[in-house]
Image (tube, helix red, strand yellow):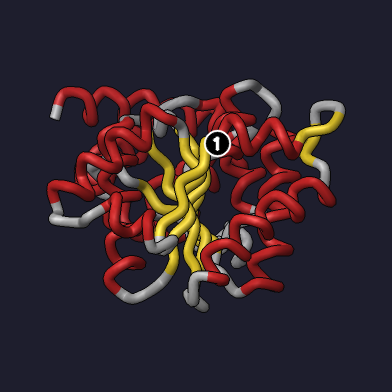
Amino acid sequence: MFSQPLYTADTALASTVARFIEHGLAGGEAVIAITTVAHWTAIEERLTAAAIDVAAARARRQLAVCGAHEILSRLMADGMPDRIAMRATILAVLDSVRDAGYTKVRAFGEMVDILSRRGNLAAAIRLEELWNELLDEQRIVLLCAYAVDAFDRDAYTSMLPSIGHVHSHLMPVEDSERLERAIDRAFIDVFGVHGDTRLLRELFVSQLPDTTAMPTAQGALLALRGLDARLADAVLESAASHYRSA
């Protein structure tokens, strides 16, 4: 399974990843965290607050923490992830936790986000594809993360369509209910208060490919972008205003 949280705030990401790790450790799974130093500090604080003995989990090799920038540097060749290097690096970490007796493994990684932030979306997508190969082969659960501004029009023309092709699930980690309300009000602003805006949104979402489960709000905006960019911009602008004033 390949899940992808979409986030704008580091605090929301840290909470989501901490829960992901906590559930894995509690279930007897090994957990691999490939993360930046800053994010790991925030994640570890939340794990400690949840009474998780992080040092003990690492000592018994149930938890492996790897630097995302360091791991990424081993994988890249001429600006793109190298398949052989990627497999060798990730499989070495997998072997380490499995040798400690853990057969079920889950992982969190943010290397794709690093590539995306560098503006190398092609490399990010290629790395996602290589992860997919390993997921099918090794039967691990992967949680990945992208920093996405829900109100950035460029996100709906390049990033979301691209990452949607290589993930089974996309999910927001921000205040999703607040976002849903903002989108609802924006649809009323643009399409009229008398229309069934919820039904209209569902109709738009139904036009998306079935390959990826996507949050309704982002799905509706992505689908509308494909139908009428002018209307999509109007909804996006209105939604941003409602969200920030809520």
Res 198 visible: yes
- Quadrant in the picture for residue 234: top left
Residue 117 vertical placement versus 132 (above, below):
above
Q: Residue at x 66, y 53 (%)?
A: 90
Q: Residue at x 29, y 57 (%)?
A: 56
Residue 195: image location, x then y, percent: 30, 50
The residue beneath circle 1 is 68
Q: Secondary structure at mark 1?
A: helix
Q: Which quadrant, please, contains the N terminus?
A: bottom right
Residue 181: image location, x then y, percent: 22, 44
Residue 212: image location, x then y, percent: 56, 61
User: Observer-nearest residue: 123 or 75?
Assistant: 75
Task: State the count of labels.
Answer: 1
Res 193 visible: no
Q: Which quadrant, please, contains the C terminus?
A: top left
Q: Is residue 178 left or right of residue 9?
A: left
Q: Residue at x 36, y 47 (%)?
A: 172
